[in-house]
Amino acid sequence: MRVVRVNRSKRANHFGTAVEKRMAKKRRFELERSSWHDARFGNGTPVEIKSTMHEHSNGQPGNWKVYREYHEKLRRHDGWYCFVVYRPHGRSGLTILQDKMVRSCDLPLLRWHGGGDHRGTQQAKISISDVF
C-alpha cells in the first residue's frame, strides 16, 4: 500500500473552507460564493474571509494575499475583511488562534505588485503583525 502525504500548503483550500464555516457561525455571516467576497452580514454588507497558518512548515510566518481588483470592489461596497490565524493539527483539523474584523478602508498601506496571470490583477501581502 502506498501512502501519499499531502503538504499542508496544498490543503489550504480545505483549511480555508473550514475557517469560513467557523467564522460564519461565530460572526453570524451568511456564506455566499462570489469571486470578490465570501459572506455577507445580515444587512447585506460583504465580507471577505482571509485565513493563514500562524507558521508555515518552513518556519516562515503566515500572511494574507489580497488581490487589488477584489479589494477595490470590496471598498466600493463598504465591505469588511475577517482575518483569521489558525494552527493546523492532524490531517484535517485546525485551531483558530486569532480573528479580527477590519473595514476594507482601514487596511494598512498596501504595496501592490504584479500578480502574474493569477486572477489577472495586482496583489499585496499582509503580515500577521500588520493586523494583530
Image (cartoon, helix red, strand yellow):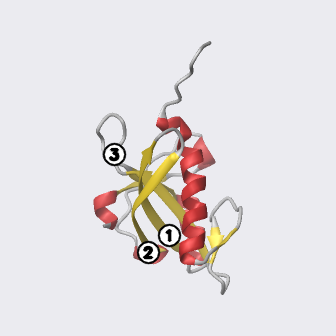
What quarter of the picture does the N terminus occupy? top right
Compared to 110, does 88 lie above or below? above
Residue drawn at 63 percent across, 62 percent down: 36
Residue 129 spot, x, y in % from top left: 28, 60
Left or right, 23 with reference to 113 = right
Q: Which residue is mark 3?
A: 55
State the SS at label 2.
strand
Compared to 10, does 105 lie above or below? below
Residue nearer the viewer, 8 or 82? 8
Residue 15 spot, x, y in % from top left: 54, 49
Left or right, 78 with reference to 113 = right
Q: Tag 2: Cα neighbours inside 10 Å, few (<14), some, or many (≥20)?
A: some
Residue 102 circle label: 2
State the SS at label 3.
loop
Residue nearer the viewer, 51 or 124? 51
On the image, which quarter does residue 70 sit in? bottom right
Residue drawn at 30 percent across, 41 percent down: 60
3 or 2: mark nearer the eye: 3
Q: Which residue is mark 1?
A: 81
Residue 110 spot, x, y in % from top left: 38, 62
Residue nearer the viewer, 4 or 58? 4
Question: What's under tag 2, amino acid-wise?
Answer: Val
